[in-house]
């Protein structure tokens, strides 16, 4: 039985005061949940505060990205070893903004997933199609290509520790959301792709949905058979919305 998960991706938002509020509310929310895990992914400068604030709780902390290099002359970057050293257990890899704005290719995403795994971090690997790709009927092909790159570069062995998050690019920060049936169709495809390598790994790997998840649509998404929770962007910065999204995992 897979345990549900909700990941809050704060992106490049927040200060110390806001972080304190979000941590406090997340702790209260986590205490209410029987069958779901909560992960907070703040900006790098807030990671120590969030880790300290979540000590002795069930909440885990993750980074939003990592560099392909273990260390060295890479000004402005952060390595997997640094994230691990700060107390992170997770890291988001291949978010659509990293792909579209910073040039993370399928191969780079796969290599980052492998590197994260080597540092003991659980990669939350994002895949998804653009609006044009969906309209052209290419969704399955695009997602299969992205998932195959994970298999090629990182290997099937990173599952089920690795998590896959389907985030249709056309739904990121746009207010548009895939219908539950649309999301389930892609999640079902992803699980099938893993199952081609191992039925056991497919059964135990968490698949999250990301893409304008809100308090009023979360439950309809989370009841779908292959959707195990959500990767939440903007709504994770609103304590009330994030709480209701987390509660939606309870059915």
Image (cartoon, grey):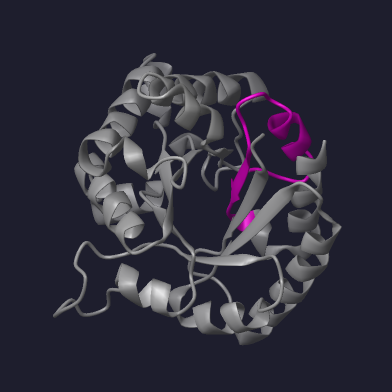
Q: For residue 66, what is the image quadrant? A: bottom left
Question: Among all residues in the image, which is located at the extreme left?
Answer: 73
- In the picture shown, does residue 182 fall above or below 68? above
The location of residue 135, given as percent across then percent down, is: 42, 18
Question: Among all residues in the image, which is located at the extreme front?
Answer: 200
Tell me which segment is drawn in magenta: 213-234
Quadrant location, the C terminus: top right
Residue in the picture at 76% in, 64% down: 239
Q: Is residue 15 visible?
A: no
Residue in the picture at 70% in, 34% down: 222
- In the picture shown, does residue 156 fall above or below 82? above
Question: Among all residues in the image, which is located at the extreme right?
Answer: 32
Quadrant location, the N terminus: top right
Q: For residue 39, what is the image quadrant? A: bottom right
Task: Please say whether residue 148 is one of the residues in the magenta stretch.
Answer: no
Q: For residue 78, what is the image quadrant? A: bottom left
Residue in the picture at 64% in, 78% down: 19
In depth, the one of 93 and 129 nearer the eye is 93
Task: Please say whether residue 217 is one of the residues in the magenta stretch.
Answer: yes
The location of residue 202, given as percent across then percent down, is: 48, 28
- In the picture shown, does residue 211 fall above or below 193? below
């Amino acid at each position: 039985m897979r345990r549900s998960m909700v990941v809050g991706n704060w992106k490049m938002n927040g200060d110390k005061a806001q972080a304190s509020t979000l941590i406090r509310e997340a702790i209260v929310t986590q205490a209410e949940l029987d069958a779901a895990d909560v992960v907070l992914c703040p900006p790098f400068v807030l990671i120590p505060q969030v880790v300290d604030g979540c000590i002795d709780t069930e909440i885990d902390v993750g980074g939003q990205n990592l560099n392909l290099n273990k260390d060295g002359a890479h000004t402005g970057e952060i390595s997997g070893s640094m994230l691990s050293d700060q107390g992170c257990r997770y890291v988001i890899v291949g978010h659509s903004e990293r792909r579209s704005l910073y040039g993370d290719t399928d191969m780079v995403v796969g290599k980052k997933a492998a590197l994260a795994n080597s540092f003991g971090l659980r990669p939350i690997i994002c895949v998804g199609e653009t609006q044009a790709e969906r309209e052209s009927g290419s969704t399955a092909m695009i997602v299969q290509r992205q998932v195959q790159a994970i298999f090629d570069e990182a290997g099937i062995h990173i599952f089920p520790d690795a998590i896959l998050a389907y985030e249709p690019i056309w739904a990121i920060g746009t207010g548009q959301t895939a219908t539950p049936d649309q999301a389930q169709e892609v999640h079902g495809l992803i699980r099938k792709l893993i199952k081609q390598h191992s039925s056991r790994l497919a059964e135990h790997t968490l698949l999250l949905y990301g893409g304008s998840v809100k308090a009023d649509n979360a439950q309809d998404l989370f009841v779908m058979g292959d959707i195990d929770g959500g990767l939440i962007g903007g709504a994770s910065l609103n304590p009330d919305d994030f709480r209701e999204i987390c509660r939606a995992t309870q059915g």
